[in-house]
Image (cartoon, helix red, strand yellow):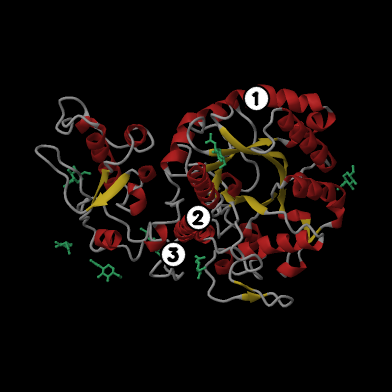
Amino acid sequence: MLRGFMFIFVASLLLMFLDCCSGSFIGICYGRNADDLPTPDKAAQLVQLHQIKYVRIYDSNIQVLKAFANTGVELMIGVSNLDLLPFSQFQSNADTWLKNNILPYYPATNITYITVGAEVTESPNNVSSLVVPAMNNVLTALKKAGLHKKIKVSSTHSLGVLSRSFPPSAGAFSSSHAHFLKPLLEFLAENQSPFMIDIYPYYAYRDSSSKVSLDYALFESSSEVIDPNTGLLYTNMFDAQIDAVYFALTALNFKTIKVMVTETGWPSKGSPKETAATPDNAQTYNTNLIRHIINGTGTPAKPDEELDVYIFSLFNENRKPGLESERNWGVFYPDQTSVYNLDFTGKSGGDDMTMEGNNVTRSNGTTTTWCIASTKASQIDLQNAIDWACGSSGNVDCTAIQPSQPCFEPDNLVSHASYAFNSYYQQNGASDIACSFGGTGVIVDKDPTYDNCIYMRTGNNITVASNTTVISSTSSPSPTPSSSKKEVSSSISSFLTIAFLLFLWNFEQAY
Ligand SMILES: *[C@@H]1O[C@H](CO)[C@@H](O)[C@H](O)[C@H]1NC(C)=O
Ligand SMILES: *[C@@H]1O[C@H](CO)[C@@H](O)[C@H](O)[C@H]1NC(C)=O
Ligand SMILES: *[C@@H]1O[C@H](CO)[C@@H](O)[C@H](O)[C@H]1NC(C)=O
Ligand SMILES: *[C@@H]1O[C@H](CO)[C@@H](O)[C@H](O)[C@H]1NC(C)=O
Ligand SMILES: *[C@@H]1O[C@H](CO)[C@@H](O)[C@H](O)[C@H]1NC(C)=O
Ligand SMILES: *[C@@H]1O[C@H](CO)[C@@H](O)[C@H](O)[C@H]1NC(C)=O
Ligand SMILES: *[C@@H]1O[C@H](CO)[C@@H](O)[C@H](O)[C@H]1NC(C)=O
């Protein structure tokens, strides 16, 4: 009896162990340096609709924390550079902040990281020496609240912390920052916190386009760059920059610290000189990045190493100073429409050209597919999606599902959502992404029209531009997408579990 219980207990422990911690993730940065953004509630809905599970914010704004309560989204929050002085000076400042600004919203809002200072080496005031003392005080405050195992403390950096980044194996931290980097790295190693870096191949390309090819920056290169010291081959600049960080850490003998990318992205618009800042390039960069990360390949120096990445940014931010590109990093406009389509799950995008749904749609501009709601979706998800589609974001005409209108009956959420989803889908190019609705939309090839409830079809009226959503005709996505790492690891985990159960069973027999 006891052994039987132990058996189940150990088996479930093993399952939990294998299920956790698998795979790298993609998150998004939610900067709010703008005067025209939707409310945090709307932003949180948008994030969920696109199945984004990780969000980075730059402060601890209460409205934002509340908006992400009970959403399943994990939040990285921040202590700004301006607050480094008070946070480093007195423990009580960190304690009070945690008590008043964080604890009331935790754990309903799932905060998992606190960044203490952001890119301090780029800050006009020399605040870098305040970072580690402030991090220590935040950590102490978390320890007092018993949360230091659940919430990790770190600080973000620009690539400017390196004095050399090429070739990657020569990556080294700049000696002018050694005074604060050494204690910082000791802190990270001791607390198993990641080293956070903001990586921008866009700037490297913009500022030395004669040396760097656009394809290499966009993950589209067909040739490789070799690191002469290691023989490692690089097909994109992102990997090369990440590896430069790994080598810099290794050079100082910090081999256990993980790297996390707290910002990367590509602007969709820029000043006349910034010719590479286009929606096409932004879509290409972010799409390839997402596929690369979700695929779990790691980098040449650290194959298969988990690498979590936050895309910059959720919205265009009109108040950011500087060149035109600064205000155009968003994947979404402030009215919540897409600047370009992006599939954050990295699943459908890659197969655009081979998925039957898509080439049927685009064969001659006449759609033969419709988008409806999944009967498996939860009522809450459906209601959120209807609100989104029929609201100012989706901009769908939902008159037909109002009482006494032709699509009101049957009066249930699946039916109403189906009508709204389809209208949105048809009006937005009938691409796979336009039928995602946080996983609650399904593409079908049978017209759902019934009685007087007419489901829209694209018809010849709306011209489907043939090159708006096809993401990268130059890259060669594998025609048979390799099964994702998650699937592989879950089948390995099932296999191991069964093997283990058999082992235990034999063990029991032996007694
Ligand atoms: C918060 O995120 C952590 C890390 O993924 C997870 O283990 C935990 O279950 C989440 N907590 C809640 C309340 O969802
Ligand atoms: C910043 O301050 C630290 C110590 O306060 C000093 O060691 C470092 O050289 C300063 N850096 C710059 C760029 O002024
Ligand atoms: C995905 O992983 C496979 C196997 O590890 C690799 O051959 C392929 O190039 C990867 N694709 C991308 C887009 O990284
Ligand atoms: C869709 O694409 C596949 C692969 O390119 C092709 O074999 C198939 O004939 C296409 N179907 C249509 C209807 O164009
Ligand atoms: C478009 O394709 C559909 C279905 O294959 C066909 O019925 C229709 O005649 C085609 N229209 C044109 C203009 O080629
Ligand atoms: C085509 O569009 C026009 C105006 O945009 C509209 O009046 C008409 O009803 C549409 N026709 C069809 C078949 O949807
Ligand atoms: C399609 O792509 C071509 C070449 O990139 C471009 O000139 C054209 O304007 C694009 N068409 C649309 C509708 O975006």
Measuring from the top left, give residue 173's x and y in whole percent. Answer: 80, 58
Do residues under tags 2 and 1 come within 8 Å of each other at their CB atoms?
no
Sequence-wise first label, 3 or 2: 3
Q: Is residue 97 above or below residue 25?
A: above
- Disc 3 vs disc 2: which is toward the camera? 2
User: Which residue has dot 3 on it?
Assistant: 472
10 Å neighbourhood of mark 3: few (<14), some, or many (≥20)? Answer: many
User: Which residue has dot 1 on it?
Assistant: 101
- Is residue 181 found left or right of 323 in the rendered image? right
- Is residue 126 found left or right of 505 in the rendered image? right
10 Å neighbourhood of mark 1: few (<14), some, or many (≥20)? Answer: some
Residue 96 lies in what quarter of the image?
Answer: top right
Identity of the amino acid at label 2? Leu
Q: Which residue is painted at 82% across and 43% down in the image?
A: 128
Q: Which residue is painted at 12% across and 41% down in the image?
A: 450
Q: Is residue 211 above or below residue 180?
A: below
* Element type where label 2 sits in the image: helix
Measuring from the top left, give residue 88's x and y in whole percent. Answer: 82, 33
* Element type where label 1 sits in the image: helix
Sequence-wise first label, 2 or 1: 1
**Is the CB of the residue bearing disc 2 within 8 angstroms of ligand 1?**
no
* Element type where label 3 sits in the image: loop
